[in-house]
Image (cartoon, rainbow, N blue to C red):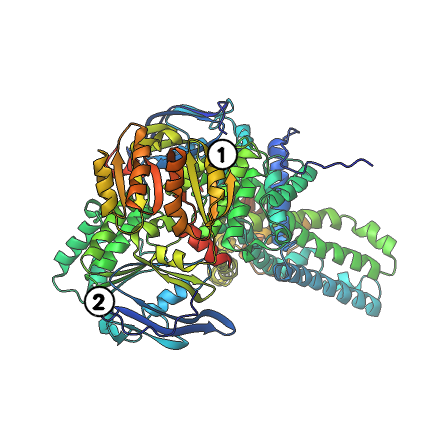
Amino acid sequence: MSAAPAVPAADRDGAPVVRVERVSRWFGSVVAVSDVSFDVRPGITGLLGPNGAGKTTLLRMMTGLAATSSGTVTAFGEPVRDNPPLSRRLGVMSEHETVYGGMRGRDFVRLMGLLRGVRDLERAVDRAIALVDMADAEHRAMDGYSRGMRQRMRLAGTLVHDPELLVLDEPLNGADPRQRVHFKQLLHRLAGEGRTIVLSSHILEEVEELADTVLLVVDGKLAASGGIRAIRAALDERPYHVRIACDAPRALAAAVVALASVEAVHVEPDGSLVVLSRNVRALQVELPRLAQQAGIRLRRVEPLDDSLESVFGYLVER
Amino acid sequence: MAGDRVILEAERLVKTYANGVVALDDVSFTIHDGITGLLGENGAGKSTVIKILLGLVRPTSGRATVLGQDVSADLAARARIGYMPEHDCLPSQVSAAEFLTHMAEVSGLPPAVARTRAADTLRHAGLFEERYRAIGGYSTGMKQRVKLCQALVHDPAFVFLDEPTAGLDPVGREEMLALIRKTHREFGISVLMSSHLMADVERTCDRILVVQGGRLVHAGEVGHFTRETETVFLEVDGDREALLAALARRGVAVTTDGAGLVLAGADQTLYDHVRDAVVEAGAPLRRLAPRRRALTELFERGAA
Amino acid sequence: MTGTVFDIGYQHYAGVREGRARALGALVADGVRTALGLGRGARAKLLPWAFVALLSGIALVMALVAGAANRLGGPGTAERTNLPSHGDYYGIAAVILFVFGALVAPELLCRDRREGVLQLYLVRPITGSDYVVARYVACLAVLTGAAWLPQLILFVGLSMGDPTPGAYLRDHWLDVPRLLLAGVTMAAYVTSLALLVASFTTRRAYAAVFLVGLFVITTPLTVGIAEELPGALGQWVSMGNLAAIPVHVNDVIFGEVSELTEDAPARTLPGAVRVGWYLAWTVGAAAILWARHRRVRP
């Protein structure tokens, strides 16, 4: 477990797209964000945290919409605050879903493009609307859209100027399952083109699918950053739980409990075993060997606290 | 677990609006005792079904009955239904206790009963001293729980929950899903839950109904839709070259899937081959599980 | 020693479910509590009770002035010098009552729609019209109370200020049914119009401002024009003064013209016409309100 990271040293992969350095933000005596530092690189980065943890404040500072109380935020090497030309490279989709009701979808996207000084506007609008698959509804007024359609059109407005950096705050609110699948494919494609995407979401299973790295904010501080597996591994004081289903649970349990790497074995009502271990690496090697020796068929081996949800729950409770 | 008692029956529902739009085209289904998920794309007729079941909209033809009572024709049928809307619906000035007592009375409970049931329902949902403060000061998680309470306070036979985890952070979401399971398992109330999050539905629901294009396209047990396939997922740490070789020697068909391997084979001896190959290669075994179908697959390629 | 563990888990309810009457009663009670700020914190009580205090204060002052006049000039002085009395009270207090109604009615309708509570009502065993009828009754009850209380204070004040209260009561007991009728007709008028306006918006401030404007602005407008126009035309324009319509009914009940209407050309119209016009507005507005809510959707 490392202490809160200081300003990161220059990285092997080249300059980060966004650098947040010792950023804090307070409102009177309320400290919303406290001494947070991290880098964001191309690809998809997930921003997670409980409600009220300071995520939205942090996103607003990252996009230059809000000033920091202390610390700096730079994107593409330039400060984000009071930097209009930078907004051409930045696409932001906030949590607020209100739009100009009477405006037609296409006009909304055109407006976004105009505000960003997009050249060849009509083509850019066509492209953005096609990306979100809203071409057949583009001439209707936005107050006639369903929630998911509104979100998609807003996303088109965010993409019309072809930004390199995308910051999306709960973009999938109200999206139905098919829209979610489509959206994930879109994000993968955009990231594959070399863009940098920061995605804030409460739906951890989806962030796990999409993001290479995550940033977890708890109570205004950065509680964890990096790859999910790596974060889990860094929590070495936390025991691992592994569920095992096999043909002879009691026999396997008896053999497993003899291992030094195993702290406890629970026998569940459904006949599966849950093994508690602090040296999961050793367990991973010894378990199949034991099963083979005893002639027991292993049907299922599942780590129970590897998921982002489990890691999140643990870090938030701490 | 889910029972077979019929709670709600929809018979040949059709809804055509004045402008000619056909929202529902001959939809019939039965909801049994248990937790049922209602899935469907936005604009596919799901909200129309919901409005008809709640008695807010009359079907153009067909009817829906809850415990035998027609919801559109019979006002009293609504006393046995609870509704938790998706959007904000709580008054900010009043306390949860007063609000719930009031709602219970509007559902027909005598005042003394309303008061005690209000207090009990809030307790079961985990709201204690907070219940005497004005709702305006509650956190999102607390408000969602009050929303659920007002749907339960009058002891309905059936509650409808519209996107119950919307806006909740991961911890709040888990708590809400646990409360929903408790509603069925401990309180004995049947649940129909509309959700866009397949993970929520897989974890909580026994059965699902899928509405698409104004029609019911799937209905059945969740277990059927998430049944095991005939493939197995295997994940090991470290270098897997030796493992691939060991598997090949045993005649196991392997394809890669990201960090893991997908093995095909209907025969149960596959597991033994996997175990032996892993030992032979000395590969640390991280994960081994039969692959299941996911509910999202229903939406991935057109109607399955 | 025996020990018992009690089951405090969820209990089903197999008792009586009382239907629409219970629901309506609950909605009326809730409406009255909302209007008066009961159970809703100190801030919610501020405005409604300030208005009640103001209305009562006016009556109290009237009673004290009449009492002083009688003391100085002998019994009956107040009547002889035609100091303001019951018949005049509503003429004086009408505007205040209108503003009070403009604040109460939006609280009863706009809040529920704005906060989304209405959808919870609509899935319960009541109809949309049940809901609005209950809100109407609640508003009417509160405004009637606010209209009666000051008049009753005035009556008690006048009778106690009289050297012979017994005689006063004997001579003036007719004032009581008159003031009760005048109070409820005024309250019904304000309730109908205020709730109808409030039903068109979800924002309380818009409704309140619109209503106050409606009541307060039609007065100078119609009065000014009516004075310039001769005969029947002037009378009918004067009838367009929304603030005065219930006061005309008050005049009919008390048989004398009050201060607000003493210059209005409409005061010369037959009583039946004035009452009929009042009913058109009060019952008409209520009917539209009811009809609008019959098929209301969340």
Of all residues, the one furthest to the front in this rendering is: A293
Reading the image, the residue beneath label 2 is A89
Residue at image coords 49%, 51%: C115
Please, is residue B239 above or below residue B38 in the view?
Answer: below
Q: Say few, some or many: other residues with alpha carbon within 10 Å of mark 2 (under 14 / 14 to 19 / 20 or more).
A: some
Label drawn at residue A250: 1
Same chain assignment for discs 1 and 2: yes
Compare residues B134 and C298 and report the one nearer the observer: B134
Please, is residue A228 above or below residue B123 in the view?
Answer: below
Q: Amino acid at mark 2?
A: Arg
Residue at image coords 25%, 47%: B240
Horizontally, is A188 left or right of A262 in the view? Answer: left
In the picture, which quadrant includes the N terminus of chain A?
bottom left
Asked if disc 1 and disc 2 are in contact, CB closer than 8 Å, the reply is no
Of all residues, the one furthest to the bottom in this rendering is: A70
Whether residue C144 is visible: yes
Horizontally, is B42 left or right of C274 in the view? Answer: left
Element at label 2: helix
Picture coordinates of residue C106 (x, y %)?
53, 53
Picture coordinates of residue A102 (x, y %)?
29, 53
Q: Amino acid at mark 1?
A: Arg
- Total numbered labels: 2
Whether residue C244 is visible: no
Q: Say few, some or many: other residues with alpha carbon within 10 Å of mark 1 (under 14 / 14 to 19 / 20 or more).
A: some
Residue at image coords 77%, 37%: C3
Picture coordinates of residue B165 (x, y %)?
44, 46
On the image, which quarter does residue A84 sit in?
bottom left
